Amino acid sequence: MKKNQNIQVQYNQLKTKSGTHSPSLATIQDFIPDLQIKVDACFLSNPYATELFLEYFKKEILDTGKINALLEFYPSQNQIIAGFIEQRLQIDSGHIFVANGAIEAIQAIIHKYCRGKLMITIPTFSAYYEYATKEHEIVYYQLNKNENYRLDVKDYIKRVNEEKPNTIILINPNNPDGGYIKYDDLILLINELNWVENIIIDESFIHFAYEDSDMALKSVVADVINKANVYVIKSMSKDFGIAGIRCGYAIMAKEKVKDILKNGYLWNMNGLAEYFFRLYAREDFLEKYDIVRRKYITESLFFISELNQIKNIKVYPSRANFVLIELLNGSTADKVTNHLICEFGVYVRNCNDKIGLDGEFIRVAARTQKENKIIIEAIKNVVEDKNLCI
Amino acid sequence: MKKNQNIQVQYNQLKTKSGTHSPSLATIQDFIPDLQIKVDACFLSNPYATELFLEYFKKEILDTGKINALLEFYPSQNQIIAGFIEQRLQIDSGHIFVANGAIEAIQAIIHKYCRGKLMITIPTFSAYYEYATKEHEIVYYQLNKNENYRLDVKDYIKRVNEEKPNTIILINPNNPDGGYIKYDDLILLINELNWVENIIIDESFIHFAYEDSDMALKSVVADVINKANVYVIKSMSKDFGIAGIRCGYAIMAKEKVKDILKNGYLWNMNGLAEYFFRLYAREDFLEKYDIVRRKYITESLFFISELNQIKNIKVYPSRANFVLIELLNGSTADKVTNHLICEFGVYVRNCNDKIGLDGEFIRVAARTQKENKIIIEAIKNVVEDKNLCI
């Protein structure tokens, strides 16, 4: 018990040091070697897609010895790699800015094209307000807790028309709650707000969303490609389960891509990222990927339905691979996340630094079937533990 | 012969497409599958260091299965990785901005801290002027061909005092000619020009330089760490032979690192880059690295002395792992590089897009002993080929 208390103290120190983002697995293991993490349910990714990527990577890169050249030599330039995404999305590569993780595209767009007022929907992914500079004014659009943090499209349009921001930002499905704006509603919103200087749509979790049991992928990219004021941001870390490689991109007006690349970002992609985007362009890979995408959606649905059975918590409706959970047993997110990691080896996202959330929240990602069972057992145990209540 | 002519046409098209930077090996192989590259003497790196890295990588990451977690999960945050560099350089990590390749640090510093007039020594690495924006004014300091493009420190100081630039940039040893400013001279220069707002010293090739047969490493980092106006930029791609991973850093004033990281670059490093910097901090790795560094310097010295025997060319004096070669047989750099790659599979840098060079030049990097022999034979053949003269 004393050992676990020490671990808790060390974990709290590390959490403070990491600011508003969770420390990485490697960082946790460095600082607290005694802490055994069994399941990383903080990281929002499809573990079956990771398996698929690793299968290709092993066969084509490791077993062939191509890994050597991949690590030794310079990867291709940004616009060459954009050509692989062009093949996949069937849009001109001139519209594609390939990024060292979606976060690089967020940074480039906010710093280069967003002046004046940014309207940010909260709760949200904190980089959107953290990457704003002192030259920006931020106004928040608070999602309504009583409506389960779901976006009310009409109310949102009304508020944008009143507030007149230069830039609006929407993540679909939203992080940390998984709230989903239906494709038709989002297209309507974009058209109604066509006067806004910059409309940023972050589709980093769109591969996990669905409108019915067809589980069809509903991206807005093809619809907005000719709109000079719309940006679509895409992380590949989550859907393809490859956060360590750092792959993302943004779709935007050709002139903007040209301008961004004019004096920067020429060699921002590493050799593994280049390999990933080559795979992304290939039919054989994509066909297999779509199978594991659907498999993971099914697992996530089942996982969420199981979580819904647990007492003392409220699970917010999500159309993504994670859920926002409110603690209703009088305990705090700090206590619950520490207990989950230190006693059960289950790493979840403590949301106590998320602005726009009223209450005590954690965010939990779906993993494999086997890992999901561990997560559910751990949460059940912790939220029913009377010692953790105030 | 017809096949080779086709290859030449395709290669020229690709070169035009790649702008002022050479296309990568992977890009060349995509566009011209018929072209067999035997030696990449365009890329300026230590192949023995690549071997050493691959040996560790295989043993510690591939054979242990750690590669999976490295690709799947988020790497550590920027400042955590700076901690590994702190261990190596024995300077506070607050001074270290870890970059996705040195080029990212160049971009961040030029865009964020360099206003007004930049004084750039030419010939140089083109990113320094290409990454300047329309808000910058560029003045060039032309290195004197009659002095073998070596920097005349006194003349340089005089010119800076007259021109009064906000920023000065020096690469040591310089790219593309390998001209080296001695440690004492560089310290003198930095002190004399202490009034300049930004002094950027690029030490990307410093591991290949030497002042005598001790081959001791002479970085200025420790001397400038408390100078708020000095930046030291470091690529790891060359000395450690790992361009595909994208690792670099810049040393600068703490307030500047803090400011850069305030709204950006939080997760700019990939999992392999994190592994590399962990290795970089380790004594066992560094001891082995220093052996291959010295071995490669010796190979480079021998390579350069062999090149000096070839007729019809002038090899400029270099204290780096590459040489600038002027063609004196009346042929052009275009013809010679195309011939070298298409007929001999030897890829060298065509310098016809480098500003500040007067004449026809190629840049050739040293590789392994075996590869160096191939390069030398190919160059001999080509520069003695009468058909290639005008």
Image (cartoon, coloured by chain):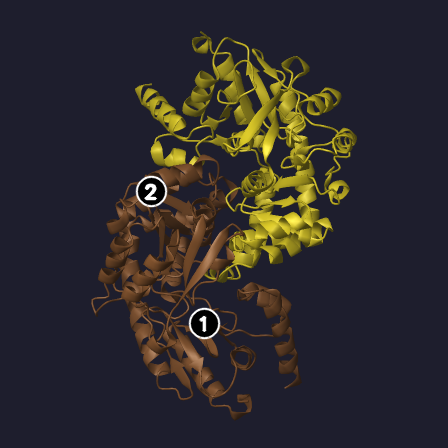
Chain colours: A brown, B yellow
Q: N-terminal of the two: label 1 or label 2?
A: 1
Pointer 2: residues within 10 angstroms few (<14), some, or many (20+)? Answer: many
* Residue at image point 33% right, 51% down: A196
Considering depth in this image, is B32 or A246 the residue closer to the camera? A246
Q: CA distance from mark 1 to mark 2?
A: 36 Å
* Residue at image point 39% right, 66% down: A47
Q: Position of residue B178 (x, y in %)?
A: 64, 26
Where, quadrant-wise, is the C terminus of chain A in this rendering? bottom right
Where, quadrant-wise, is the N terminus of chain A in this rendering? bottom right
Q: Is residue A113 left or right of residue B251?
A: left
Q: Position of residue B339 (x, y in %)?
A: 43, 19
Q: Is residue A268 above or below residue A55?
A: above
Residue B202: quadrant of the picture: top right
Residue B275: quadrant of the picture: bottom right
In the rendered structure, which amino acid carries the disc numbered 2?
Answer: Ala
Q: Position of residue B383 (x, y in %)?
A: 51, 14
Q: Are marks 1 and 2 in contact (CB under 8 Å)?
A: no
Considering depth in this image, is B12 or B287 the residue closer to the camera? B12
Q: Is residue A25 above or below residue B111?
A: below
* Residue at image point 40% right, 71% down: A367
Location of mark 2 (residue): A253
Q: Is residue B173 left or right of residue B35?
A: right
Q: Is residue A320 left or right of residue B63?
A: left
Q: Secondary structure at mark 1?
A: loop
Q: Marks 1 and 2: which is nearer the front?
A: 2
In the rendered structure, which amino acid carries the disc numbered 1?
Answer: Ala
Considering depth in this image, is A190 or B199 the residue closer to the camera? A190
Location of mark 1 (residue): A41
Name, please, the residue furthest toward the front: A162
Q: Chain of mark 2?
A: A
Labelled disc at residue B379: none
Q: Is residue A273 left or right of residue B164?
A: left
